[in-house]
Amino acid sequence: MIKNFYKKYGFFVLIAYLILAYFFMPLGLIAIICMASPIIFALLGKRRYWCGNFCPRGIFFQNVTGRFSRRKPIPRFLRSTGFRIFIVCFIMGNFGLGVYMNWGDFAGIGMVFYRIILITTIVGIVINTVYMPRTWCAFCPMGSISDFITYTKAKDSQK
């Protein structure tokens, strides 16, 4: 019951984050929870359970932008391994550089998290209105890393 309620209204977590962190940048560090959780779930053998059930942005895309989506099929290249690797490297590279340049400054590091969440949310909104509601989720860096962990664990267990 609580899970169903959250799957319906959990997007308010994203909205609250975007508003509150804007006014107090150290709160931007809270994004660590949403970045680490899918990896933890994948390591525990739950694949993308976080993504489908608890990710505030995924819930936002499903329940808010889904109302405006044209629901066109997701282009194959957005799901391709090469594109997903590029997105992981591009976003994590920018993230790593931003953290390095702001090391020791919690507000600066919070700004890095906030900026990445804000920009990727805007990109997701645009993409999701053209294609399916959770198109961003097809190449989300954290979901892609979770898929890689799941794939690697499955391969290791077959040996």
Image (tube, rainbow, N blue to C red):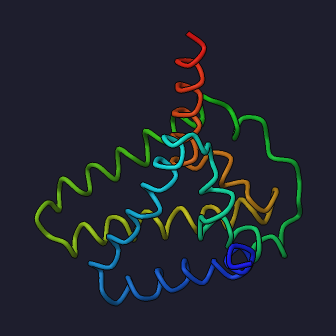
Question: Left or right: where does residue 26 sit relative to residue 116?
Answer: left
Write the residue at 36% across / 65% down: 113
Quick one: quadrant of the C terminus? top right
The front one of 31 and 122 is 31
How many numbered marks, from 0 up?
Answer: 0
Question: Left or right: where does residue 86 sit relative to residue 31?
Answer: right
Relative image position of residue 82 (x, y in whole percent): 59, 28
Q: Is residue 91 above or below residue 62?
A: above
- The image quarter in which residue 11 lies: bottom right
The residue lying furthest to the front in this view is 1
Question: Left or right: where does residue 83 sit relative to residue 74?
Answer: left
Write the residue at 39% across / 46% down: 92
Q: Tell me if I can see residue 17 in this picture.
A: yes
Q: Is residue 105 above or below residue 120?
A: below
Quick one: quadrant of the N terminus? bottom right
Q: Tell me if I can see residue 87 in this picture.
A: no
Write the residue at 52% across / 52% down: 38
The residue lying furthest to the top in this view is 159
The residue lying furthest to the left in this view is 104
Relative image position of residue 142 (x, y in whole percent): 51, 49
Relative image position of residue 53 (x, y in whole percent): 67, 62
Relative image position of residue 55 (x, y in whole percent): 59, 64
- The image quarter in which residue 27 lies: bottom left
The front one of 31 and 100 is 31
The front one of 157 and 105 is 157
Q: Is residue 139 above or below residue 127?
A: above
